[in-house]
Amino acid sequence: PSTDIRATLIMEAATQQLNSMGFNRALARRGLESTKVNGQIDVQRAAMWCINNAQASVPGPAVSSVDERKLKQVMDMGFSRAHAVKGLQLKKNNMQDAVLWCATNPDMETKGGSKPSSSKPKPKPKPKPKAKSKPASFGPESIVDNPERRKRRLEEYKMLEKEFLQEESKLSEKKKTYGGGRLGGKKKDAGGDEKVVDSPSKPKKEFDVTSAIRRKHESEKAKAALRQAEAQRKHEEKLKKERDVRRAKRQAAEAKFGDNIATALDYLSKNYSIERVRESLGIIAQIATRILKNPNEVKYRRIKLGKEKVQRTIVRPVGTMVIMKKLGFVEEEGEILVMKKVNPGVIKGQLAKMQRYLNRGATHIPGDLKLADAKSGPENVLFAAMQLRKMLSDIAELPGSVALRSLSTEKGTVFHQRFAGLHPLVEALKKLGFEQDHQRKYLRLNKPDVAFLRKAIADLDVEIERRKGETRVSRAVRSLLAKRGKDKTVYVVDKAKACLARIQRSPSEKRYWTLDLKRLLSSDEIVRDAKVLFQGIGFKVSGNTASWNGEDIGGLALAQEHLSDRWKAALLQLSAANSKKA
């Protein structure tokens, strides 16, 4: 039922309660209306009001006159005229109470359900003028004067009464089967004989709309709770099935690894991002470290697999459970991991393997550069390392830039000039996380780990600094300083820098590609020492002529940077030696 009907039912119930206390209905109704607070009815406050105003409210005769407009509205709901008049008279023209009284007292209608005919003939209805629009009214008339609401309310009352009658009939049938409607017992008479004595039956219950509505609401709540519990059960069953399917797939994939932790680590690196692998291995290392510190604490050796963090880092990634089993954990019923016996030696060994794997990219760079030294000159390896360091630094500064993370593999690009001829450095790129696209045109770092890249940059800084002193440029500068002195060395270094800068400014001017060293340096002795220097910065020297191939413009910039760096280092070394002598 609607909110308006419930309010009417609550008012009627409170009126009956005050009526049972000895107050007449008019006084009780006035007391309830006078003591309302924010629309809420308080029976105790109304009773006190009735006691204080009992003398001022003396019941008078019944209302004989009936409001024709309200009478017509009540009759429009389906009640006969006599029935509607009776209800309005009893309820003193209160239309809500009259409708409720007519609905709960249908026996007052005339037999046959027809309205009593009036002696006067009915006048023909006059056409009503169109009413002007008025603001919405929320009085008693607006509450009940709604055909749809009236129809729905009457249907609801009929349904509730029907349910009540069905329950009464079932109860009466049950009583008939157990003793003709009366339940009694046996009692001995004066002669000692037993006879059946019927107990008095309970008075027949009357139909109560309020209690029927309350029972209906309670049953609806109970049904809703059952539906919610059933939905929750189905959801939990669905989640359990999904976990079982994932566990079966994981176990099938991990069966191929056997007991090899290295295979599991390689699978993790190929199929998951570096961040997720680091998170998973970090959690496993944290668990193992706690167990080593507290081997007798059982709580550190029991891991519930149902937790979200454990699911994300240990259960879902394929390969992590192999690592947990190698540490000594055993899976029980797919719900918990237990380490029954602590073996510190095994745990420390597995932790060392995981730590080496976490530092796999950065720690491999020195070895890869050493392999590259055997296949190319020191300048080529140094310039490749410098280019790689610059590229990784840019990515670490702006990891979201796809352009910085992409390295074209076509001819004439940085990759082709610096890395293509050095296979160990190509492998180093792959270990750092670079992957080739499906068209084989790019090497791209899809998921950069900034912390991981900074470790690689630190290793490259060490290797670059160590290799700078071993290049031909560095040896030539030291030789010129030792043999020709500072002034002539400055002259040669400045000429070499000027040639490099001129080609970089105008790379299409082929006349700058070829240099006559004898004409440039004006001394045969200086030319012999300068040939090694020009070979180190990228020129091909034949006799007294040095020529550039016109391909590697980026290499000239690296060579100029390296020459400036070595010249500064040589000057610092010379000044330190002179200060010692002084």
Image (cartoon, rainbow, N blue to C red):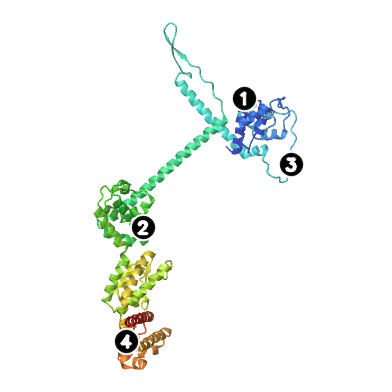
Crowd class of label 1 (few under 14; some 14 to 19; many from 20; radius 10 Å):
few
Amino acid carrying mark 2 in the image: Glu
Amino acid carrying mark 3 in the image: Lys
Q: Are marks 1 and 2 in contact (CB under 8 Å)?
A: no
Q: CA distance from mark 1 to mark 2?
A: 74 Å
Q: CA distance from mark 1 to mark 4?
A: 124 Å
**Does label 3 or label 1 sit earlier along the sequence?**
1
Question: Which residue appears farthest toward the top when viewing the image?
Answer: 191
| Foreground label between 3 and 1 | 1
Mark 1 = which residue?
Answer: 21
What SS does tag 1 mark? loop
Q: Which dot marks residue 279?
A: 2
Q: CA distance from mark 2 to mark 4?
A: 54 Å
Residue 353: % across, % down: 27, 60
Amino acid carrying mark 4 in the image: Leu
Observer-nearest of 541 and 565: 565
| Foreground label between 1 and 2 | 2
Residue 460's place in the image compared with 345, above or below, is: below
**Does label 3 or label 2 sit earlier along the sequence?**
3
Crowd class of label 3 (few under 14; some 14 to 19; many from 20; radius 10 Å):
few
Indicate the quadrant where residue 383 lies: bottom left
Mark 3 = which residue?
Answer: 128
What SS does tag 2 mark? helix
